[in-house]
Image: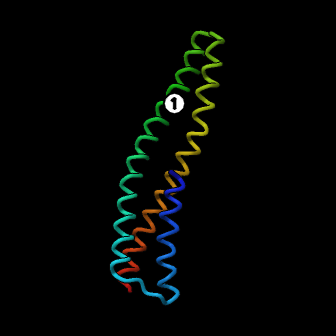
Amino acid sequence: MLDRIADNRRRAEELIARLDAGDIPSAEEWNREISLLLTWIGFLQHERLVHLIVLALFSLLTILSVGVFLLTGVWALIALTVLFLSLTVPYIVHYYRLENGIQRLYCLYEQLIRTKERA
C-alpha cells in the first residue's frame, strides 16, 4: 500500500514539475491526474480506517493482557503480552507511515487544484 502512495505522489509531483519547467500539461492531463488522485485517496481512506480498527484492537488486547497479568499473576500471560506487543509495535509504525502518506496525498491534491487554476 505504501508503494501505491509513493507512485501517486511521484506522478503528481512530476506533473507539477513539468509546469514549473515550462511544459504546460493539457487540461485533460490535469483532470485525469486530479481524478485519479482523488480516487486513490478514497481507497486509502478505507484502508486507513481498517488499519486503525486493527491497531486499536491489538492495543486494547495488549493493555488488557497486562492488566489481567497484574490482577492474577499468571506468568503465561507475559507470553501473550509479548506476542501482542510484537504485533502492535510494527503495526503502529505501519499506520504512522500510512497516515503520513495519505496526508501528503491530500496536500498534493490541493496543490494540483491550485496549480491547475494558476496554469
Q: Is residue 9 above or below residue 118?
A: above
Q: Residues within 10 Å of mark 1 (few under 14, many from 20)?
A: some
Q: Using the rendered view, name the quadrant where residue 30 is placed.
A: bottom left
| Between 13 and 73, the one nearer to me in the picture | 13
Q: Is residue 49 above or below residue 22?
A: above
At which x and y percent is residue 68? 55, 15
Quick one: which residue is furthest to the bottom in this view?
A: 22
Give the residue drawn at x 58%, y 9%: 72
Residue located beneath label 1 in the image:
58
- As drawn, is 88 to the left or to the right of 51? right
- Mark 1 lies on a secondary structure that is helix
At which x and y percent is residue 64? 52, 22
- As drawn, is 112 to the left or to the right of 82? left
At which x and y percent is residue 95? 52, 45
Q: Is residue 66 above or below residue 104?
A: above
Amino acid at the residue labelled 1: Phe
At which x and y percent is residue 117? 34, 82
Give the residue drawn at x 50%, y 73%: 13
Give the residue drawn at x 51%, y 30%: 58
